Image (cartoon, rainbow, N blue to C red):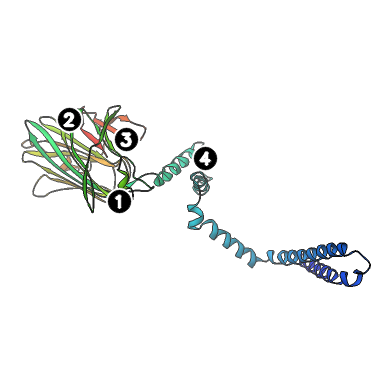
Amino acid sequence: MRALSALLFLIGMMLILLSILLPITLGQLIPASVVDVAYKFLQSLGVALMIGAVFDLTINTTKFTKYVSEKIQKIVTSKNFLSDLGKDDKKEALQFILKPPEKVRYSNINDYFDKQIDKSLMLFETNFRSNLSIHVDVYKHEGIIKAKSMVSFRAYKVKDKYEKFTIRFHKDKNKHELLNTRIITYDGSESIEPEYSTRGLSHLYSFEVPEKYNELPFLTISREYIESGYEDVLCFDYSTITPSDGVDFRMILQEGLEVRECMIFDKSLTEKRSEHSNDLMITSQDWLYANAGFVVLVCEKIKNFSSSATKNPNPVVDDIEIIEADENGCLSAISATDNLNIPSHEQ
């Protein structure tokens, strides 16, 4: 192979020399136009053969091959190259990287991997939040156990504008009351009137962020609402719709009320009871994904009652029956044993 490359290199040099001698030796015998064409042809062919011979000689060396391979890898894996890919191209790249092992022999395993890839690509579409704080006061008013919630979080946009913000209640309309919704910035706050709608058994309150706020990198959203239970029981439920970096939940109970059960739906959430009262805290320093949350059963205190939550602070949720799941994967649930109309909500 090297001998052939060397031969081609010599032929190229000879052709270049011939092109130089051609006008000198035959310039008087052949028309100038023919000499000019022949001169350019021989010179171009000679240069091409010499370059081809050098490249052919170099490309077969291990060092050169490794060098070119590293350069291509850097280009393909560079941030600029990947960020410029369209959504479909990004999906194809992930499908090439994230594929099931060959030893897994199951016909629908590719569908599972594709579903996870589609879920990952939603990271480029969905807002996320941080500083999620939920403060709940539980009290009895006019013979009914009620919960007043004050929720605030910091929302970040992924695209050029913020997505619509929604809070969803899975219960009768007369069992909840949205008191206020506010957008808070460094320049002040603005009260927002959400739009009410229904979807199946759900009651939704949504609002679009005014255009003037889209230039800000983040917004603080606050809400206050009251949920009503029954004379002797309230089942409080909370679950996330969008990803959230941690949560700080505190439930303060009026004298005479107690937390009977607490069921958690994400392993990163940690439950803690107060030593001096029956107040409840649920916290997480980790990321919470969609539909992560918890259910808290509040009842009137019963003398000499031994709470199963005290015996088992993290009960296994075996008595929950799913009764609704919409196209966004949002769930509502009731207790299969008590058949309660749970005043649950998601946001």
Kind of residue indicated by mark 2: Lys
Q: Distance from label 2 to label 3 (Cα)? A: 20 Å
Nearer the camera: disc 2 or disc 4 = 2
Q: Which residue is mark 4?
A: 105
Nearer the camera: disc 3 or disc 4 = 3
Q: Tag 4 or tag 3, which sits nearer the N-term?
A: 4
Which residue is at the front of the view, 34 or 169?
A: 34
Nearer the camera: disc 2 or disc 3 = 2
Q: Which residue is mark 1?
A: 218
Is residue 170 visible in this depiction of the protein? yes
Q: Position of residue 154 (x, y in %)?
A: 27, 49
Q: Which mark is residue 330?
A: 3
Kind of residue indicated by mark 1: Phe
State the residue at coordinates (15%, 31%): 229
Q: Position of residue 244 (x, y in %)?
A: 30, 47
- Residue 340 placement: quadrant: top left
Q: Tag 1 or tag 4, which sits nearer the N-term?
A: 4
Q: Tag 3 or tag 2, which sits nearer the N-term?
A: 2
Q: Secondary structure at mark 1?
A: strand
Nearer the camera: disc 3 or disc 1 = 1
Kind of residue indicated by mark 4: Arg
Q: Quadrant of the N terminus?
A: bottom right
Q: Secondary structure at mark 2?
A: helix
